Amino acid sequence: MNDELIQLLGRANVLIEREDLIPYSFDATAVLKQIPQVVVFPRTAAEVSGVLKIAGRHGAPVVARGSGTGLSGGSVPTPGSVVLCLVKMDRIVELDARNFTVRAQAGVLTQAVYDAADAAGLFYPPDPGSMKVSTVGGNVAENSGGLRGLKYGVTRDYVMGLEVVLADGEICTLGNKCVKDVAGYSLKDLFIGSEGTLGIVTEVLLKLLPKPAARQTLLATYGRMDAAAETVSAIIAARIVPCTLEFLDRKTIHCVEDFTHVGLPRDAEALLLIEVDGHPAAVADEAAHIQKLCTQNGATSVRLAADAAEATRLASARRSAFSALARVKPTTILEDATVPRTELAAMIRFIQETAARHRLDIATFGHFGDGNLHPTFLTNERDADEMHRVELAMGEIFTKALALGGTITGEHGVGLAKKAFLRDQVGDASYALLRRVKRTLDPGNLLNPGKIFDL
Ligand SMILES: Cc1cc2nc3c(=O)[nH]c(=O)nc-3n(C[C@H](O)[C@H](O)[C@H](O)COP(=O)(O)OP(=O)(O)OC[C@H]3O[C@@H](n4cnc5c(N)ncnc54)[C@H](O)[C@@H]3O)c2cc1C
């Protein structure tokens, strides 16, 4: 098979030596590793199609990969697999400023899409914390969220069209630039969030928005975590929808401050990082209202970012939370249990109790406005007893999230890491339907087999 792949793509676009394969044997998920058989770098949809046909003839599984920043093991290779890495398909094909769209190949970095839109006076809102390194193909495959999700939604809300290569090598174009289009099933939606199990995304047509004229960032400090949760409810009850409403607990504040030195208050129990954007008058009005609500709900201080540079520093500090926490212990397991906003305080209390009961180090931060929490286990995979307690605690946290009406994953996907919990969330009938869809589109179970569920 490797010779056929080399013939199709050229020797420079095929990795077969063990030392070259190692960097592709894991993603950003802790513990999971598997060396693939071969890694290939196609440059066109036709080459992707050719790779799928060759792999299909040899019965080899194909695992799509962008930048490998996934947090549920989605791009961890299946044994004997071909890793199909899309990073060489990194061209912005077209920016259509009149239709507010950008067309990009799957390997374009999320930040590059944002920058291209920004240069045209437009705005691409989805901003996963990993946006400087993640690819748009990976974002579509995981339906990634970000810090602006509360007001602007997630990747799905911006996908107008996709070019997808199916398991048998057929190249399909789905969707178009029309604001309205109800011709047939919305097939593109089937591929969004499908984690590389239904087809390979080769090109993405994304919707853009006009750039907001003004922004204001606020940092509110709390002595009690409950007060931060109450502030979120009060802001929403006041019918204000900030674009960002992020939360950091005490442990995360300390780790981020040690890492970034931006001046976060070390005596705080919790922090809220809030951003409003839009028309300058509305931004000023909402920022003043939010400041008042923070104080009324127990904030010990509320700081307004003095200028855009300070706002960027604070947002970057929040974006660095995972890297900052990863310095503490050898193994960092970042989860994304998510609950309705009204259940945030109950969920955080449960995470804290669970950490104490199992004698574990868990830091929590996340997208508070979305109810999307990141309980992060700071642990050591070489300590078998501690890893057993991590597994127990994780199971209890997911069970609690479901009991509160939540989900096992708000944005990181199911992958390998959470497939044991999926049936509990969706129920038997939906679980069977998911598998029927997979069997229909990928009857040979070649595309990322064993991810999301076993067939
Ligand atoms: C520091 C850090 C911060 C993060 N912050 C966020 C966040 O705020 N929000 C969020 O949602 N996620 C976040 N993530 C998770 C991760 O960055 C996202 O899931 C991202 O979309 C993955 O993109 P990638 O290019 O790295 O994809 P990969 O990790 O390579 O792949 C992810 C999945 O997509 C599939 N895939 C990749 N490309 C394609 C393609 N072209 N066609 C079909 N399937 C494909 C893979 O098979 C795999 O199942 C974060 C990760 C890190 C390390």
Image (cartoon, rainbow, N blue to C red):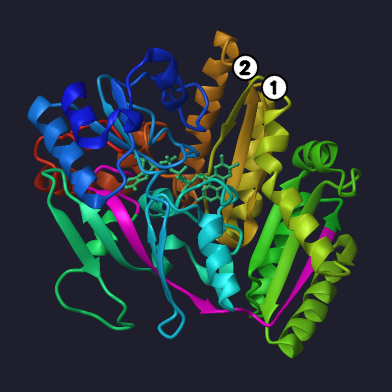
**Which secondary structure type mostly characterizes the magenta part of the structure?**
strand
The percent position of residue 19, horizontal first and vertical second, equals 44, 15
Q: Are marks 1 and 2 in contact (CB under 8 Å)?
A: yes
Quarter of the render that holds ligand 1: top left
The percent position of residue 81, horizontal first and vertical second, equals 26, 25
Q: Which residue is nearer to you in this view: 438 or 65?
A: 65
Disc 1 secondary structure class: loop
Quadrant where the image shows the C terminus: top left
Q: Which residue is nearer to you in this view: 441 or 295?
A: 441
Q: How crowded is mark 2: few (under 14 residues within 10 Å), some or many (20 or more)?
A: some
Is residue 422 depicted above or below 37 in this figure? below
140 left or right of 168 in image: right
Disc 2 secondary structure class: loop
Q: What stretch is highlighted in magenta?
A: 193-220
Confirm or reject: label 2 Cβ below 8 Å from ligand 1: no
139 left or right of 384 in image: left
Instruction: Quadrant for residue 167, please give it.
Output: top left
Is residue 275 depicted above or below 388 in this figure? below
Q: Which residue is nearer to you in this view: 131 or 417?
A: 131
Going from the N terminus, do you reach mark 1 or mark 2 first?
A: 1
Amino acid type, mark 2: Asn
Question: In the image, is residue 219 part of the stretch drawn in magenta?
Answer: yes
Give the residue drawn at x 84%, y 75%: 292
Is residue 330 depicted above or below 243 in this figure? above
Write down the residue under mark 1.
329
Amino acid type, mark 1: Lys
Write down the residue under mark 2.
380
The percent position of residue 88, horizontal first and vertical second, equals 39, 44
Quadrant where the image shows the N terminus: top left
State how far apart marks 1 and 2 are (Cα): 6 Å
